[in-house]
């Protein structure tokens, strides 16, 4: 009897422990991962690409994080892992997305679902070696008709919600309704940054109509009109700068407008209502996307022109000579039993070196061991696209961190680098850490959507202007772009004047611009020269020496912002 009671209690304890164990790890046994890197698996090295990770099989949410690892470097047998954390916290079944830089894709991609203590709950690999493209490619979101056979075909529901994920795209053709407002915002930001978007409308228009889509349309007050049984045409009033590029039966077929640095091409019917001949005519008139006006060269030039203070190295030969002279004099005097003169000579030499080193440091400001230069470029229309370019240099081996918004991962800008130490990079959800070898330059770039500060309000006659500057930021230079010409904006106390009239402006050409104005001109003139509308260009620069983590660091920031004028 006693044995049966003990056995019964043991069975109860075992059942309780089994229940607790199953509650503690509810998802380990069945969880699976499925990943896709690129548009339909297609991407370009050293450009961003979207990644989608699908988690399935969880019976309950788990605490953990999802990590995507690439293995890069010049030695495939001993590669360097480049890690990006795309999700963290309470994870459930579903799809997790991000825009990641694509590097050396010789080895398969590794995707892991990790537990709170770093244990691997699930993992999968994806080979992307055969999917690498050499040039930007067309992406069709929705139904497809042949555009040369090289396009990437995806569903509109698979489009990424980060505008920099479209960096490898030559043009995006939206041929089915898109319902995700975050993706519409991303498309608007991509177009402002230089993207090329093709919209098919017709009877599909009301299925994807939304405020973000209307901000991109080259037509105002759009309406549908039936031109054949079951076939509709989108009509409206062309906006300023819109061009009708193709017509059919005296009706507009293809209307294009420039938006920021990019273009929106509107096809006024559905794809199924377009003939093969008209489709080829349309394809021939779609411009290629442009990458956001690069400021990498400004950052690199600024770092190359930065004076690096090395007083210890500069005066080391002087110290050596002083010590040798002091020792020789001491030795010669020692034989004569006189020590005062050599000691005085040696102390005088040391004092001279010390004073001279102090004068040297004071002349150049102060000593810094780490150097960080950031150039920020912002384009603001109805949407905002921002690109930050970073340059780092250090006198000794160290590591640097970049704080960023969730999943706004930086990409390495020096594409020719193949050494292990320069590939070393680890990105958490909101911070990226990269290795910085001694006396080596390193350049990275990051993109975002927040941080623009200026707003330009323009009257309908383009004769009165008002600038809103809610953060009271300063500017060393400001230009107004109007009708293809640049005008100098008056500055008051280091800021653009809040209100001014056209008669207050003075036209300025490149030869008469200040250094800061010329940097604005060269950064923006290549695409503003063909842009309609009125634009405000501002230039702000600052520099300081900080002692972060007890290591002196020189930080320089250049901020260039371009804001499109809003009609009042």
Image (cartoon, grey):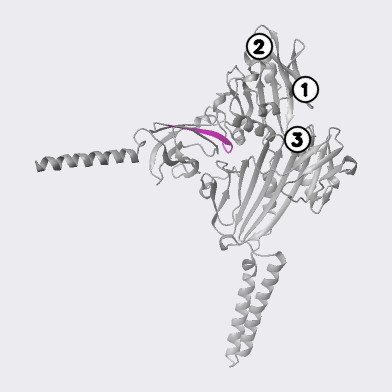
Residue 288 is situated, as x and y percent measured from the top left of the image, at 68, 28
Residue position marked by numbered label 2 in the rendering: 275
Q: CA distance from mark 1 to mark 3?
A: 22 Å
Q: CA distance from mark 2 to mark 3?
A: 33 Å
The answer to whether residue 50 is magenta is yes
Residue 303 is situated, as x and y percent measured from the top left of the image, at 67, 53
Q: Is residue 461 above or below residue 403?
A: above
Residue position marked by numbered label 3 in the rendering: 527
**456 with respect to 98 (left or right):** right
Which region of the structure is painted magenta? 45-55
Secondary-structure class at tag 3:
helix
Front residue of 450/246: it is 450
What secondary structure is the stretch in magenta mostly built from?
A: strand
Q: Residue at x 65, y 45 (%)?
A: 388
Comparing labels 1 and 3, the label whose residue is closer to the camera: 1
Q: Which mark is residue 238?
A: 1
Image quadrant in which you'd find residue 173: top right
Front residue of 272/344: it is 272
The answer to which of marks 2 and 3 sits earlier in the sequence is: 2
Q: Residue at x 64, y 28 (%)?
A: 170
Q: Is residue 441 above or below residue 145?
A: below
Q: Is residue 132 above or below residue 145?
A: below
Q: Specify the quadrant that holds the N terminus.
A: top left
Q: Is residue 493 visible?
A: yes
The answer to which of marks 1 and 3 sits earlier in the sequence is: 1
């Amino acid at each position: 009897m006693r044995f049966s009671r003990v056995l019964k209690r043991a069975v109860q304890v075992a059942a309780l422990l089994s229940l607790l164990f199953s509650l503690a790890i509810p998802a380990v046994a069945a969880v699976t991962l499925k990943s896709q890197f690129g548009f339909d698996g297609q991407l370009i090295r050293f450009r961003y690409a979207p990644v989608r990770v699908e988690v399935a099989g969880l019976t309950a949410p788990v605490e953990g994080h999802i990590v995507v690892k690439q293995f890069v470097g010049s030695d495939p047998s001993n590669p360097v892992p480049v890690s990006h954390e795309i999700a963290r916290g309470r994870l459930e079944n579903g799809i997790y997305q991000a825009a990641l830089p694509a590097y050396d894709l010789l080895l398969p991609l590794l995707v892991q679902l990790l537990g709170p203590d770093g244990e691997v709950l699930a993992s999968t690999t994806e080979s992307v070696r055969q999917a690498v493209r050499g040039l930007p490619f067309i992406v069709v979101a929705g139904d497809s008709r042949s555009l040369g056979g090289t396009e990437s075909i995806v569903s509109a529901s698979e489009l990424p919600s980060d505008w920099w994920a479209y960096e490898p795209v030559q043009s995006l053709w939206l041929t089915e309704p898109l319902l995700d407002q975050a993706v519409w915002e991303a498309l608007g930001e991509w177009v402002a940054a230089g993207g090329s978007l093709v919209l098919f409308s017709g009877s599909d228009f009301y299925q994807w109509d939304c405020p973000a889509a209307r901000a991109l349309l080259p037509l105002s007050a759009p309406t549908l009109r039936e031109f054949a049984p079951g076939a509709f045409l989108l009509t409206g009033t062309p906006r300023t700068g819109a061009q009708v590029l193709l017509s059919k039966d005296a009706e507009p077929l293809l209307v294009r407008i420039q938006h920021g640095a990019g273009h929106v091409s509107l096809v006024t019917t559905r794809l199924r209502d377009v003939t093969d001949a008209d489709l080829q005519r349309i394809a021939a008139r779609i411009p290629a996307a442009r990458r956001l006006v690069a400021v990498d060269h400004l950052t690199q030039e600024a770092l190359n022109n930065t004076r690096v203070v090395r007083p210890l190295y500069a005066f080391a030969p002087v110290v050596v000579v002083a010590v040798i002279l002091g020792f020789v004099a001491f030795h010669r005097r020692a034989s004569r039993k006189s020590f005062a003169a050599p000691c005085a000579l040696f102390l005088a030499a040391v004092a001279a070196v010390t004073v001279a080193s102090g004068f040297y440091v004071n002349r150049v400001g102060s000593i810094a061991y780490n150097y960080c230069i950031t150039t920020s470029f912002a384009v603001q229309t109805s949407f905002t696209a921002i690109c930050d370019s970073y340059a780092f240099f250090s006198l000794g081996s160290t590591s640097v961190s970049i704080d960023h918004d969730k999943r706004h991962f930086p990409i390495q800008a020096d594409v020719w680098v193949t050494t292990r130490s320069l590939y070393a990079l680890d990105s958490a959800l909101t911070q990226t850490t990269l290795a910085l070898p001694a006396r080596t330059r390193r350049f990275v770039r990051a993109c975002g959507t927040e941080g623009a500060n200026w707003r330009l309000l323009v009257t309908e006659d383009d004769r009165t202007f008002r600038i809103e500057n809610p953060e009271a930021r300063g500017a060393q230079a400001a230009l107004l772009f109007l009708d293809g010409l640049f005008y100098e904006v008056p500055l008051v106390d280091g800021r653009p004047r809040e209100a001014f009239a056209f008669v207050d402006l003075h036209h300025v050409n490149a030869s008469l611009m200040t250094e800061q104005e010329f940097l604005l001109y060269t950064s923006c003139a290549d695409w503003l020269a063909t842009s309609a509308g009125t634009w405000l260009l501002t230039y702000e620069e600052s520099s300081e020496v900080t002692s972060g983590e007890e290591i002196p660091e020189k930080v320089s920031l250049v901020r260039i912002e371009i804001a499109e004028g809003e009609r009042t």
